[in-house]
Image (cartoon, rainbow, N blue to C red):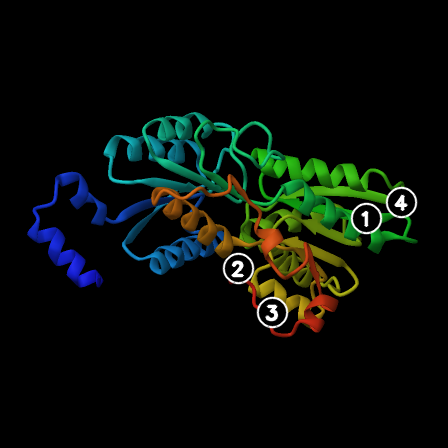
Amino acid sequence: MTRKLLAALLVATALSPAAALADDPIRLAFLAASSQNGYNDATWQGVQAAAKEAGNVEVEIFDGEFNAAVQYAQVEDIIAGGRFDGIIVAPNDTVGIATALEEATEAGLLVASVLFPVGPDLTVMTPQVKGLTTTVASNPVIGATAGAEEVVTFCEGKDPCKVVIMIGQLQFPFDNLRYQTFQTVLGQHANIKVVATGEGSYSPDASLTAFQDILQANPEIDVVLSNADQHLLGVEIALKDAGIPIEPIYLIGGGLNAITVDKIREGLFDATASGYPFSEGFYAADALIRAKQGETVPNWIDPATLAKNPPIVTKEWLDANPDFVAEWEG
């Protein structure tokens, strides 16, 4: 029986209200940590792509403004409004948002977390919130450890090896975890000296200001270790303004955006930890759509295991893979 014939028969037989609702679109809300953030924008593009591929799915983005209270209120409003079937959240506060998301699942909403798990332990990927459908994220400790180990390798034979850490915001649990991971790995090597830490707030402009202040007290550095590619853009400008050659300094970021890929290929930056924002959005939306349709979906999807690129991308790897395209612009 063709789809058109089936539709005609359903109309002719006066469907019950419950059956008629079967054709209603699935509605998903994407709660971005910040809609102005490039990584979140790529995640949103992934959400939209999954919705388009599935068909009969409507999606809407909400700006979390990098503000935990704003995002918490958004969840409460979505529960009260009753317009949506599911929520995809890039959490600003991975602990504080848990209560609101549990209320959402109790209200019948499907919920997926991207980039980080929601709950008190950021290393536990399986759901810590009752009823949460899935988490689409990689363990943040793995990427931070891999990045710090690249620094250890660069610093071999250099004593002291002076390192500056550029982190997002230490008030964020996930940034604090990455920072502590950096410190733990580097602290095992007596030749490595962390001379300063700057908070870049995932902004080239904020990173520029923070790094200019660092350079005034530490004009001679060997390494900049960061959790975000955006930070390296500000670092690059600060070094140029100070007349300090960039190439001898080992620069490693995080997120794997297109701008950084180009700079690594040029030999200006050295490496970055992989990020998968588009994939996270796509896999999360796809999982909620399939769950709404009655399918069983994994409660943890690790985008790193589904990607072709390694945890740390270097010039050597990019030279060997000239057709590689990053998932976001930066």
Between the C-alphas of marks 3 and 4, the distance is: 35 Å
Q: Is residue 1 above or below residue 290?
A: below
Residue 177 is drawn in which quadrant? top right
Q: Secondary structure at mark 1?
A: strand
Between the C-alphas of marks 1 and 2, the distance is: 27 Å
Q: Amino acid at mark 1?
A: Lys
| Residues marked 1 and 3 touching at CB (< 8 Å) | no
Left or right of 160 in this view: 85: left
How many residues crowd around disc 4 within 10 Å: few (fewer than 14), some, or many (20 or more)? Answer: some
Mark positioned earlier in the residue sequence (1 or 3): 1
Between the C-alphas of marks 1 and 3, the distance is: 32 Å
Q: Amino acid at mark 3?
A: Phe
How many residues crowd around disc 2 within 10 Å: few (fewer than 14), some, or many (20 or more)? Answer: some
Q: Amino acid at mark 2?
A: Gly
Q: Position of residue 324 (x, y in %)?
A: 60, 69
Q: Nearer the viewer, mark 1 or mark 2?
A: 2
| Residue corresponding to mark 1 | 162
| Residue corresponding to mark 3 | 324
Left or right of 75 in this view: 263: right
How many residues crowd around disc 1 within 10 Å: few (fewer than 14), some, or many (20 or more)? Answer: many
Q: Position of residue 122 (x, y in %)?
A: 60, 34
Q: Nearer the viewer, mark 3 or mark 2?
A: 3
Mark positioned earlier in the residue sequence (3 or 2): 3
Q: Is residue 127 above or below residue 241?
A: above
Foreground of the two, 40 or 69: 40
| Residue corresponding to mark 4 | 191
| Residue corresponding to mark 2 | 330
